[in-house]
Amino acid sequence: MSNRNYLSIYAKSFNWAGFFLPKKTYQKCSSLYDFCRTVDNIVDDQIELVIKKKNLSTFKNDFINKNFDNLIIKNMWDLMIHHEISIKIVEDLFTGVESDLNEKVQLNNKKDLLIYSYRVAGTVGLMMAKILNVKDKDSMKGAIDLGIAMQLTNIARDVVEDSKNNRFYIQHDFQVISSTLTLADLFYESSFTSIKKIPFNFRFAILVARRVYRKIGGEILKTKNIEDYNKAGKIYVNSLGKVYQTVLSLLDLIKLLLTKEKSRYMSNEYLLINEEIDLNERI
């Protein structure tokens, strides 16, 4: 299987931020995204559930058995070996996406929402931190926070689309959508000082990704009620908005250089996640 740059096809916000990374690092991030996107595409494919389960099982077995005929799997293992990424993190990702392979998906409380968001996106934040050579443990937790924040943003944006696929991560209610974005904002905030522990030449790209993705939440809130939200379709940040958020990220970079605050993370929320998953083992 040939490698495909899914990052430039599917993830416009991340690809924009990736422009500010060194080329070799961008390629590594692209390989990580290709792997995660391949898993997502299997789960989101518009075919029978039993076939999707079989396809995911085949890909997972190919990954575990190191089938390097698949270049996406080979590149992923190269990243894992070179950057000491625990296989437990990837297993968490598989567990998260496998939970979407049911006739109906419903999360019932905050703990379920946080654990799901960690598995499908916090894992990606943690793997990204390792690729960017972050060593500080609290900063790695900050990277998980950023991944969870972005996933909560996705969930708040895609309520209508997800419900069509019988997936109910949160209620189809504007107040619930707003409160989900409020929770996402807390995770975005907690991730900020952690970025200071990222090597300097990678920091700006992460700040840009953080700002642009967070802005999606702001665009969602502009709809103001469930009727307008339902009519809005896929909400995104346009090119002008991305430029503006990039300029603001320059100010974030300066603020980060001046801050003396230590890395922090969402410790109370981590207690909920740690009831099921030992995050320290992954870090």
Image: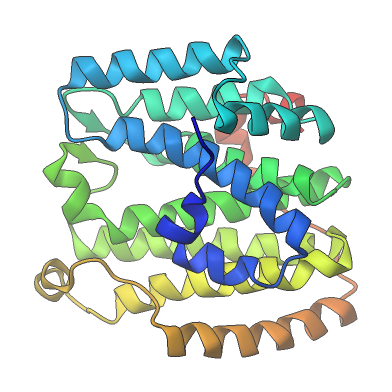
Q: Identify which residue is drawn at 32% across, 31% down.
A: 43
Which quarter of the rendered picture does the C terminus lie within?
A: top right
Evaluate whether residue 34 shows in this view: yes
Picture layout, residue 237 above or below residue 198: below
Say whether residue 7 is left or right of residue 159. right
| In-front residue for pair 42/193 | 42
In the displayed structure, does residue 66 sit left or right of residue 219?
right
Drawn side of residue 152 relative to residue 91, left or right: left
Kindly tell me whether residue 114 is visible in this rendering.
no
Q: Position of residue 209 (x, y in %)?
A: 59, 68
**Percent from the top left, x then y, of residue 154?**
38, 56
- Using the image, determine if residue 98 lies above or below residue 198: above
Tally of numbered discs: 0
**Quadrant of residue 186 within the rendered picture:** bottom right
At a point 88% along the width and 47% down the height, the residue shown is: 136
In percent of width and height, residue 64 lies at 59, 12
Identify which residue is drawn at 38% across, 82% down: 238
User: Looking at the image, is 273 positioned above or below residue 214?
Assistant: above
**Front-most of 260 and 230?**
230
Q: Which of 80 and 90 is in front in this view?
A: 80
Residue that appears at 32% across and 66% down: 178
Q: Position of residue 55 (x, y in %)?
A: 33, 18
